[in-house]
Image (tube, rainbow, N blue to C red):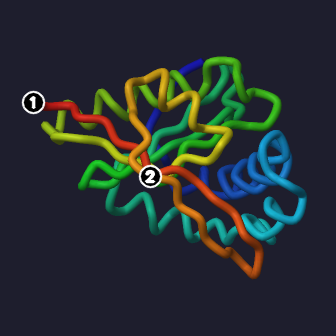
Amino acid sequence: MRIRRFRPDDADAIADLFHASVRQGGLRHYTAEQVAAWSPARPDPARFVAKAADRVFLLAEDDDGTLLGYGDLEPDGHIDHLFCRPDRIGTGVGHALYGAIEAAAREAALPRLYVEASDSALPLFERHGFRVDSRNDMVLNGVAIHNFRMSKALQS
């Protein structure tokens, strides 16, 4: 597996991976109704091209160039996305992506990282030293769902 920077021609594969990860991987911790509300349709790939313009956007791929996961880091330390292919959840892809994201944050001398983690992602972030700050209960597309606001100090 290798980690590399996003390229605009990755956007279609990322849109597919995001939708599959939420719709299939999300079922481990959320109901079918909740995952359908979270990702009602495959997102427009242009959304990922636009996101990449103002942040660190990293991909994990195998030796054949197959996309395994992706993650991003906003300039203020917010990790907006960290998603893996459903069949690769729990195999180290998220761990590798997170490590590269934290390295980028440390290189930028960011004082802290924060994320809104799903039930699925919560254990990964806890293993990397994040703490739960609060539970976020919300209604998304008419369906009650939740995630967790988590943070980690990088500088003291």
- What amino acid is found at the position of numbered circle 1 in the picture? Ser
Identify the residue position indicated by label 1 in the image.
156
User: 135 or 123: nearer the eye?
Assistant: 135
Is 10 above or below relative to 47?
above
Q: Secondary structure at mark 1?
A: loop
**In this rendering, does residue 79 appear at all?**
no
Q: Quadrant of the N terminus?
A: top right
Q: Quadrant of the C terminus?
A: top left
Q: Position of residue 112 (x, y in %)?
A: 23, 41
Identify the residue position indicated by label 2 in the image.
134
Q: Position of residue 55 (x, y in %)?
A: 34, 54
Q: Secondary structure at mark 2?
A: strand
Q: Position of residue 72 (x, y in %)?
A: 44, 47
Give me the residue at 80% from left, 63% from top.
Answer: 34
> In the shown orientation, is residue 117 left or right of residue 146?
left
State the image quarter where residue 88 is shown.
Answer: top right
Assess disc 2: are there few (<14), some (14-19) or many (≥20) residues with their C-alpha within 10 Å of its C-alpha.
few
User: 45 or 129: nearer the eye?
Assistant: 129
Give me the residue at 33% from left, 31% from top.
Answer: 102
> In the shown orientation, is residue 2 left or right of residue 64?
left
